[in-house]
Image (cartoon, helix red, strand yellow):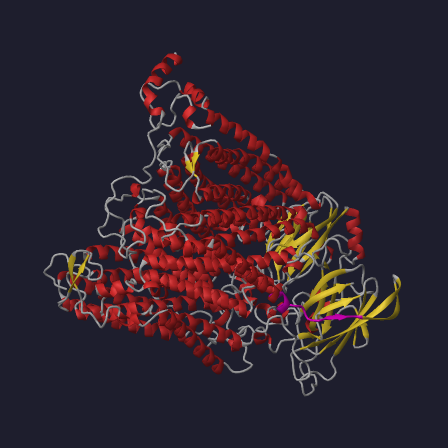
Amino acid sequence: MSTTDVRPTGQPDEPEAPTNRPPSMHRVKMWIRRPYARWIMVLTVLIGFLLMPLAWLLLAAMNQTGAPASEVMKDIEQTVFVFTMVSIPITAFVFAVLVYSLLGWKHVSGDTPPEDESPAIRSNTIGVVLWTVVSSVLAFFLVVWGLAELAQITANSYGTIPADEQPEDKQALIVNVTGQQWVWTFEYPQYDGLTTETLYLAKDRPVYFNVTSKDVIHNFWAVELGVKIDANPGAITQTGVTPNKTGTFNVRCAELCGMHHAYMETAIQVLEPKAFNSWAREMGGGKTS
Amino acid sequence: MSTATATANVFGTEVPQPKQHGKPGGIMRRLNFGTGLIGGIGLATVAGLVTNALTPSGASTATFAPAAPEYVYLAVLLGWVIGFMAGIGAFIGPIRWVLGRDLTHADAEYMAGKDLGWKRYFKFTTDHKVVGIQYLVMTMVILGFGGLLAMLIRTELGVTWAEVFSPSFYNSLIGTHGIAMIIGMIIVVMGPIANFIVPIMIGARDMAFPRLNALSFWLLFVAAICLISSLFMGGVQDGWSVYYPLGAQAPPGMLGYQMTIIVFALSTGVASVNLMVTILTMRAKGMTWSRTPLLVFGVFASALMGLYAFPFYQYSQILALSDRIFNTSFFDPLEGGSVWLYENLFWLLGHPEVYVIIIPSAAVLMEIIPVFYRKPLFSFNFAVAGIVGVVALSGLVWAHHMYMTGWAPAVNYPFMLSTEMISIPVGFLVLVVIGTMWRGVVWTRLPVMAVYAVIFNKMIGGVTGIYLSDVPVDQYMHGSMFVVAHFHYMLMGAGLFGAMAGVAFYFPKMTGRMLDERTGSIGLWTAFIGFQITFGSMFVAGLQGQPRRVLQFDNLFNISNWISTIGAYTIGIGMLIFLGAIISSWMYGDKASSNPWGSKSLEWQTPTPVPLENFEVLPVVTERPYDYGVPDPYQKELDAVDGDLEKVGK
Amino acid sequence: MKRAFVTLLAVVVGVAIVAGIAVFNSVRQAEPPTLAAEVSGTMDTPQGTLPHATLELAVYPNSSAKVPPPKTPSQFSANWLSGQPFYYPSTSLQVPANSAVTITFIQYDSGGQVYNPYFADVHGTMDGTMTVNGESVTGIKPSEVGHTFTVHQYPESTQPDFFLSVPLKMNKANAKTDKDGYPVNPQKIEVTFITGDPGTYVWNCEFPCGDMYQEFGGPMQTRGWMAGTFEVV
Amino acid sequence: MSAETQQPLYPTTGEPISTIARRAKAGLWTLIVLDVSGTLALIISYTYLWSLNVNDGWAPPGADLTYDQTNALPAKSDATFAVEWPFWAILGIVILATLAMWFGYKEIKRGNHAGLIIGTGLALVITIAGLVAQWIQITTFPFGSGNGAYASAVLLLCASNIFHFGMLTFLLLGIFNRARKGLINKAVHFQAQLMSYWMVWICIAFLLGAICTTFFVESPNTDPAIFGSFTQKS
């Protein structure tokens, strides 16, 4: 449909309204009566619902190899879900306007510039204010949510304790992760320095990583546990997690580290605590310190 | 006191001239691209041979590498850069200044390429229109080169059952692709459109510093050659953000990268100075800031960010170079250097640079949309506010690339804040676009259709950017294919498609011919569809957990990578078609009138082809830009409506 | 018409360039020729009697009249890899699946301290040991490593994990050398391990024997020198 | 160029000199921003490494120098830190040159052409002297390029000083020569003015360097993470 058959009603496109302005609620009502306004709203809702499944599809993709295997990973996926939901309305609105401006409002073609017939709308206070408020509120929400989540994840993963301090949790397992071109090695100081090239963890037992590198920057990424931290030469970075699922998961290097970067992968075996201890013993790890 | 005897008639006024040394142009008459090549190759060869002779056989550098290739390659690069610039006459200007032989008007006109025909494109020509065209061609060459590498990368990733290339070569592919594309994208708007259009748009006769203008282009050319040469010396094997100490393990090709960046940053700095001064001091009479078109704002903002950001990048490479050659230890943790120092210096450029790319192409859209909707730009001040907001925040967000480096976990909180705040000014720009579309009658031509593609991509890029700006989510996404897909949506989907729209829009003014609409559209939309396929499935690969910059991966990721590769080939075809449209229209296109789009902006009021001095008499601006459209149809019934509205209200 | 033709030309030429460069490079970047272990008889192992294959590799500190340098992927890299150590005759290895494989290393290079003591021990061999010049050991001093032969995971979840790391003892710096500069009686290391189902893996040296930062550049990051592929077929 | 015309025209484009001057001044400010960013990059590097002291390598004792034989600049003694006063001496030289330049500029504003020539000539000579002094300093450091972050940072700061000196020499040569030829005169003196502004910034750049090399010497981080070995940390 075109703008010509629109019954002229209230005029929210005027920057400053005349003195004898009608009640604003009423103006909004009349504005909504305009066909294009309704159509865009309908389209927005429609597109919004079309986009909604994405929220689950994203998680489905993330969960293909057994994630979430820890609280941290749960938090991450929750955040992804919420952010998708939050960003759908505004995206849907923009897409709706794009679609409608192509199909709904008039369009002309031809080689010569057409006559001016569009309304000279230089601004629209209501629209601008509305947009600013909405986008600011959304951004503010994202920030607040993000900060809260970050604080929680930091708590779940021991955050960053000064290198020379013990983790508060004495039961916590300590693993010294060494990145080196192009093999990971994991040292268990509590099991008199037992070292492996596959990461073994105990279910529901907090683990605390001291990550460093012998040569270049690597990135220690325990995919399904949602743990990621750079392994920097000349520094020790710390993170931690509590696996809550037994099974085999992946460690990948997520920072380009030379020719065999792609091959710098290994497995995580999360065992039941008993199985873990017996494994450590038979590997010559001795008793738990 | 040199008493000026001769005078010259400059735009109607008799201007006393200094002494004319020889023919107009002096020695510049003999210098051109050819002499540049001779100088560059000659000096490079000499320097290389001398260094080779001076390096004792079997000598090794401080890091045990064979010394000869390192030093010889460095000498060759330096020889090439200096020799070429000398050969093409870049140093004549400063020398003349020292000698006190100022240019006469005749000299200046010769150097601006007056009556030189096609030759002026192969000289140190100062006319901004010539530089614009040179940039246009150079941009297409660089982007084509980067696209070629992209095709090779996708081939490797698509062939999941074997290694097509050796890992080292694959790594140098991704590194070179990255930096080539970044360079190409930085200049794709700031080069052709900003140089060619902006001076005319603000009613100036040329840039503020014409010789700097030529300098910036030829420096870029020299840098591009350095980059390509590095591929033959082992390439840039460490990604475009050459992190240290990995970069300290690279073969000599790294020298090529470092030289490229040092020279390119110089070129960008010079160009930024030139553009900013032009915009600040040379706007036509009456062109107040509120009457300045938005492209000018965009270009100014971009130049400003480039101005303060690029030196950090340049110095990070200078330090790295001295690490490599003099064995200093800025980025060498063994000897007290810090890897985080490099990351900070690098991203201090790295993030503003993203907006250096995005803002101009967004501003081009702001130029296009009003013309094709015959509607004033929606809320001009809001658009300006958006640009200003982005510039203001651009310098405060760099560490969001370093969430996972653990360099200072406490600062993740503020940087997360600033990063998510930047979505507000970017949102302003989106509002301005859709607000201008609102109730408009669209004239469906190629440039404005491209705008739809850009907005679509920008929304997706922006939303995925929100995930990445969030530290917890980044803990999963960082360094994965998701990031790659995200910034391709921003840089390519928003940046490059916007630039294509701009080229299509300004093509008639720049070349005097219309861009072939049908072929162009086919190319654009093919590329667009391929783009969605490629990076849509790359998002999936990233979510599944595929790290970036890997050439072999778990076959869990096979399907998404196959789809990606198919899409990538589609993009390649589409881009080639668009390129073909540009070339063919340039050769055989229909002649364009001086103002084919019926735009009211200043640059379209000049005749096509634009005369050397742009305007015989400098124009005076008396009205706001984008003065299109008719009064709002509702306006007339206003009072009546309000009248009975009141009754209804009771 | 002319325009359409030019466009078509651009597309064709573009595709041709891409394809040409891709083919050219994939040929130029080809791996060194495959070196397959030959099967000879059987061997009794904890997993029962398995076919037995043997493979012989040498590690040279540098090329010489006697030993040509490896054919490197890029003709240019000869410039900056000259005088670097390399595995000989090839780095693309191939061993039979589900069998006992014995690799014999002849180590001509000197050495020193390895960064990570983990790689001074033997990992992944049949009984966790190797034979150095006849005597069976489970590891050597971290300060006496010449090179290591470390096979590790290829990022495929569908193939069995495989990890093998063998430290190759260094030669004393003052060892007696022949006219090519190689020790007259080099270190002879022998390891036997059992391969599982077919799979593709990569291997590289974990001892810093290259150049540049941490001596891990140059040959360490070039296939055909100190790194390669390890195929179980 | 005649002094009696009120507003002389720029021969190349025929615009009044005041316009050209405005343009050049804007250009100078942007150039200063460019150079500030660059210098800041060096200052940041210095202070950042100083604060971190990675692997205890900020200023390792001269005895155990790594790779010192192959260094481009080998160490001369095993002193780890440079002497402080030369930095300030060189800063003083630059300030002198700047004062001379300002003197010349003020003189030509008053119309005293001889004063301009004296001022710029003096500035030129002093700058060349500074260049020599800087060269002597950089070649007589006790440490080589290979020992420690401190050595690297100081050497690069001095290198940037040399770069600045070289640029000053070139520019002052031009200014002096043009002053001699009368191309800089009472009516057209903006180049002298901009030169003085530029030299003020150069003084600040040198001052920043001198402050770093004087007040940030011993690293505050006395217990840095020891590279590679980390078992004792748990």
Q: Is residue B131 above or below residue B198?
A: below
Residue A103 percent coordinates (x, y)? 49, 33
For the N terminus of chain B, give its image quadrant: bottom left
Q: Please give left or right for residue B158 compared with residue A110 in the image.
A: right
Residue C34 is a magenta residue: yes
**Residue with the most extreme bottom position:** C179
Picture coordinates of residue B533, whole percent (x, y): 59, 47
The residue at 13%/61% (across/down) is: D110
State whether residue B463 is above or below residue C148: above
Reply yes or no: does residue A152 show up in magenta: no
Q: Is residue D21 left or right of residue B275?
A: left
Q: In the image, residue D150 lies at what x, y percent? A: 46, 66
**B497 in relation to D53, above or below:** above
Q: Residue at x 47, y 80 (%)?
A: B49
User: Considering depth in this image, is B69 or D94 the residue closer to the camera?
Assistant: B69
Q: Residue furthest front?
A: C1
Q: Residue at x 36, y 31 (%)?
A: A119
Residue D203 visible in this rendered orientation of the protein? no
Where is residue B531 drawn, in percent x and y?
55, 48
Rendering quarter of residue C177 = bottom right
Q: Closer to the camera, A57 or B136?
A: B136
Q: Nearer the viewer, residue A94 or A280?
A: A94
Give the quadrant of residue D164. bottom left
A71 left or right, relative to D131 = right
Q: Quadrant of the C terminus of chain B?
A: top left
Left or right for B193, reference A93: left
Magenta span of residues = C25-37
Residue B603 visible in the current orientation: yes
